[in-house]
Image (cartoon, coloured by chain):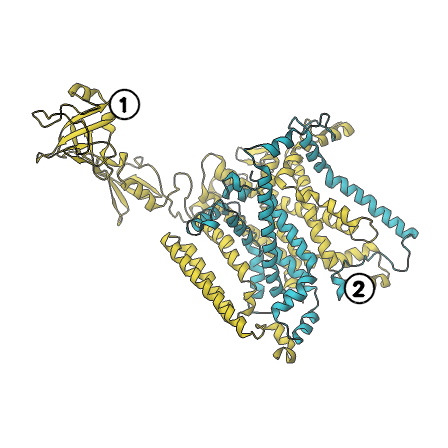
Amino acid sequence: MSEITKAVASPNVDQKEGYWSARVTRERTLRLVIIAFALVYALFPVLFIMSSSFNPSGSILGQGIIPRNASLVHYNALLNSPNNPFPLWVWNSVKISTITAVLAVLISSLSAYAFSRFRFKGRRTLLLTVFLIQVFPSTLAIVAIYLLLQTIGEIIPPFGLNTHAGLILVYLGGALGINTWLMKGFFDTVPRELDESAMMDGATNFQIFWVIIFPLVRPILAVVAILTFVGTYGDFILPLVLINEPQEYTLAGG
Amino acid sequence: MAAISQPQKNVLYPSSTPASPVGLILRLVGIAILDAFAIWFVSQLIADQAWFLAFLVVIVTIGFNAFFLSERLYPFRWFSPGLALMILMVVYPMVYTIYVAFTNYGTGHLRTQEQLVQSFLEPRGSNLYIPEGATPYEFAAYRSEDGRYLLWLIDEQGNAFAAAPGEPLKANGEGIEGIGPLDEDGFPETIQGFERLNRIQLASDDTINTQIFGTAEDSIGISGRNAARFELRYSYDAASNTITDLSTGTTYTGIEGIYTSTTDPNDTLPGGYYVGVGLGNFIDLFTSPAISGPLIIIFVWTVMHALFAVLLTFALGLSFALVFNSDLVPGKKILRSAMLIPYAIPAFISVLIWRGLLSEQLGPISVTVRDWFGWSPPWFTDAFWARIGVLLVQMWLGFPYMMLVCMGALQSIPSEIYEASNVDGANAWQRFWSLTLPLLLVSVGPILISSFAFNFNNFGVIRLYNQGGPAITPTAGWTDILISYTYRLAFAAGTTDYGLASAITIVIFFIVLVITVINFRFTGAWEEVSQNV
């Protein structure tokens, strides 16, 4: 049962063959060649971003990968401008994204556990509703979200406009979406016998979830955490609309 | 210990495991605190007249109570935090958008009726007038060096008082310094710092007619040669929703959010309020030639764009995940992390970089392609190549996500299955098509469908890549998808029409909903996922 926690041994390795046999070497070479191409494909635009960051002209047009007259102008401007407290924005972004990711993982893993382990009336409906609600085009809903935070902020100022808590709350509204599905699929692969034997020993549902299942599904928790973190970190529309104080800006908004 | 005798039942109809008294008390206390907070919050919301939000908070609170007090609803306890946040932050904006779709909310109709009527009734400059037969006061006017005015007035009973703009009326000029001796009519001959105006000066002074002397509620104005008390210019009749301009006697009726004269349709009061227009926005959407003209082209491209974006990113992401999913790759973890770097760069920056790379004159990719083939595609000016360009960018933006998801899913496929197939002598190709892919699709299927829905509305990439261009019509472009087209219609012309935009949003929502449900049925993903375990 423990193999689900470890990376599953590659299906392609025949245990009887040695690591250096001709067939294995051929396969390894093939894989490495493909990986090399993949890396080039994945990274060359990133290289351009880096190279243009050292390029004083401010345009990426007509430059080579290695800028002819590299300079740190942009970095200097970035780090030392009093109008743009860049390090502060980075900190804001990281803080918001981290809190969102952790809370989203907790919320969606609770739901995913219940979807995976319990059978109850309304389960299918709820599962489908959670999925379908997120296909709503939210471009316009931003107007409503703005008004919503404004109303909340008048009553509970720490969660209103221009606050990180308010922004996090908005992000968490989407926590129950595809993440729950992603996790449920993984939870389903954890054998039921584990739960049952724990239940025999008198564990409560919550103990089963927290002590037994939670550590077993770490890979998918990590995936969801990364997805949420990156999604939050890269989002720029919400912070742009909801946050107007330069001190509270996130990276993308600033 | 019912769990031992009937383990299956415990699984199918779970209940909370017998709680310790402490646990029970903690739960009750928690619910009590939550309820107290909710009651306070709802009362505040009602005070703010946020009715619908208050209603939702009540629903959420009742839900919490039911879930945590009823054993039958036990499983829902696990959903409660997520559900509560979803209802407040996702469902509320959704319902709000649906509501707006049936109104004419937008430029010229941004206020509620109440707010608009209030703006006509509050006593300020343009809302005040001096009635025809108003009793005039005897008065003298004074002006200071720096252009401040002061009036000295005597009413019919002979009471004298002074009036300055923005200050309460002062009987006998109390509190004003330096009042000189009164003349035979009872007006001060001099006031310190002010010059008394004679008839000619008064007639030639234009600004004094625009002054409001006294406070807003109790004020006096000069009209021609008379000074008289201001009255409110408009009166509102809630029963018939009409506003009457008392200075002209015209009655204005609220028609589609604008107060329009009952006699002349072109005579309206400034400003408008938002009002339900029924299906008006939806009818506009399908009948107005300016809107529905390019709709077919845009719709077809929207579907194609979403479909190809998903297929290409999935194919690429899965291939990479498969290549990496082997113990034969040295330094697998580091290499794999490097592959995910594109994902760490915010999309809006990546798209801009790609714009630069593809730039037709100087972009490094265009230059390289031109060097090799003597020709490079017009990535931004040609309809076909612009679309290809969008898909290229989408592919690069999206493959790390698919790779990440596929890597997770590949790991959950038990290795015993492969061992069995090895014994059966299946080759790698057969293994992929008959084992890996079907098993993968069970867990990844919903992700693909959700990714389709996401790309259906991927406003950011389309907008940043080429703003929807090249143009078909002034308001539509070849790479525009429905949502970016909506944006153009609703906001780009300098005016906003939230009502129409919301109507399109709802139409899009239903299209995606239908496509999603069909996808589920077609792939059977729904059945497998819901019946799993």
Q: In which quarter of the image is the N terminus of chain B?
A: bottom right
Taking the view exactly as shown, the residue that stands out farthest to the right is A22
Taking the view exactly as shown, the residue that stands out farthest to the top is B200
**Mark nearer the N terminus (1 vs 2):** 1
Binning the other alpha carbons within 10 Å of mark 1 as few (below 14), some (14 to 19) or many (20 upward) gives few
Residue at the disc numbered 2:
B416
Instruction: Name the chain letter of the residue that bears numbered label 1.
Output: B
Is B397 located above or below residue B357 in the figure? Answer: below
User: Where residue B245 sits: x, y (%)?
Assistant: 24, 38
B8 and A199: which is toward the camera: A199
Q: In which quarter of the image is residue B296?
A: top right
Residue B65 visible from this viewpoint? no
Q: Say yes or no: labels 1 and 2 on the same chain.
A: yes
User: Where residue A141 sits: x, y (%)?
Assistant: 50, 47
Residue at the disc numbered 1:
B146
Q: Spot the cyan chain and give its letter.
A: A
User: Where residue A237 sits: x, y (%)?
Assistant: 55, 42
Kindly state the secondary structure of the residue where label 1 is placed.
loop
User: Where residue B40 sits: x, y (%)?
Assistant: 40, 59
Q: In this view, does B486 lie to the left or right of B165?
A: right
Is A222 located above or below residue B384 in the figure? Answer: below
Q: Are marks 1 and 2 in contact (CB under 8 Å)?
A: no
Binning the other alpha carbons within 10 Å of mark 2 as few (below 14), some (14 to 19) or many (20 upward) gives few
Q: Chain B is drawn in which colour?
A: yellow
Amino acid at dot 2: Glu
Q: Is residue B112 left or right of residue A227?
A: left
Kindly state the secondary structure of the residue where label 2 is placed.
helix
